[in-house]
Image (cartoon, grey):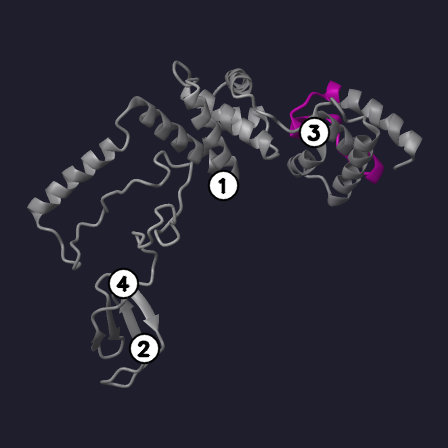
Amino acid sequence: MLNGTTLSGPKCPSCGDKKMVTDQNTGELFCGTCGLVVTDKISDTGAEWRSFANDETNRTRVGPGTSLTMHDMGLSTIIGTQNKDSTGKPLTSAMKSSIERLRTWDSRTQAHSSADRNLRQALNEMDKLKDKLALTDAVIEKAAYIYRKAMEKKLVRGRSIHGLVAACLYASCRNTETPRTLDDIAKGINIRRKDVARCYRLIFRELELKMPVVDPVKVVSRIASIAKLTEKSKRKAVEILEKAKKLGIAAGKDPMGIAAAALYLSCISTGEVKSQKEISMASGVTEVTIRNRCAGLRKMIQEEKIL
């Protein structure tokens, strides 16, 4: 069968069968049993590529929307990859070579300056990290916005693209409260943690970013899943952290450290056998930090009688 969709609507005038097939390439509707072409002109109900309204800003009928994650924001046009004309017939060899040459020049002219090429490479790196770190579209959109702001401030010149991309992604994760550490992003893009931290401090200072305080409750699920803890221990840890936040004990503390300590204490309470070393490896903080945070939380637990 040709590349098309089968419809069970009108009957075939020749054999009376309802198995009608729509060919998307030629725009024909024909019978799937006897092959009779019912009509050769089908209306395309998809999105239109030009606006008929006087208002140029109205893009409701112009296809896909714009996005900061594309270097041209989705506004440029490209020459299609199919070597067929408007009627669906294959192009001649001479015309095919001309179209190939036009495609090459079309691709080159989209990024004619060094800044455009830099932006295109940076956004490609962000797209790769999106799948590697399981990030959402909102995080990548925010990271692209921060990178464009860094380009406006001329912070990109003379610096590593990978370092700035990683810093923008980390800033975006912090801004959207997505639990990703510097080590996660540095490992994902395969550069040193020190380089990511240096670039992050630069954009934080120069762009005057306002970052929310990380909620330790949001990193509990991450540590618990890596350490393979039960749901009961996780819920008890959240209960401890909520009480610690109300009493102000969690203020100024590393969110990952205090979340790891709460999980360790909840494991002791529920009888689940997990060592400090296992919790430490899952959270990325040292055992000494966990012991220090446990001391403050134990005192609170004894006073409030939580466990």
Give the class, few, some or many, for how many residues have Cα within 10 Å of label 3's Cα (few <14, many ≥20): some
Q: Main secondary structure of the magenta part?
A: helix
Residue to which mark 3 is pinned: 278
The answer to whether residue 39 is magenta is no
| Residue 94 vs residue 66, the one in the foreground | 66
Query: Where is 26 relative to 114, above or below?
Result: below
Q: Position of residue 121 (x, y in %)?
A: 36, 28
Which residue sits at x=67%, y=28%? 213
Q: Which quadrant would residue 26 be assigned to in this image?
A: bottom left
Q: Which quadrant would residue 250 be assigned to in this image?
A: top right
Which secondary structure lies at badge 3? helix
Residue to which mark 2 is pinned: 19
Which secondary structure lies at badge 1? helix
Q: Is residue 170 visible?
A: yes
Amino acid type, residue under disc 2 in the picture: Lys
Lower position in the chain sequence, tag 3 or tag 4: 4
Residue to which mark 1 is pinned: 137
Query: Where is 234 relative to 258, above or below?
Result: below
Give the class, few, some or many, for how many residues have Cα within 10 Å of label 2's Cα (few <14, many ≥20): some
| Residue 139 vs residue 54, the one in the foreground | 54
Amino acid type, residue under disc 3 in the picture: Glu
The CA span between labels 4 and 1 is 31 Å
Query: In the image, which residues are magenta?
Result: 268-289
Residue to which mark 4 is pinned: 24
Lower position in the chain sequence, tag 2 or tag 3: 2
Which residue sits at x=24%, y=84%? 13
| Residue 73 vs residue 305, the one in the foreground | 73
Please count the marks in the image.
4
The CA span between labels 1 and 3 is 32 Å
Q: Position of residue 133 (x, y in %)?
A: 52, 35
Quarter of the image containing the N terminus?
A: bottom left
Query: Where is 80 relative to 191, above or below?
Result: below
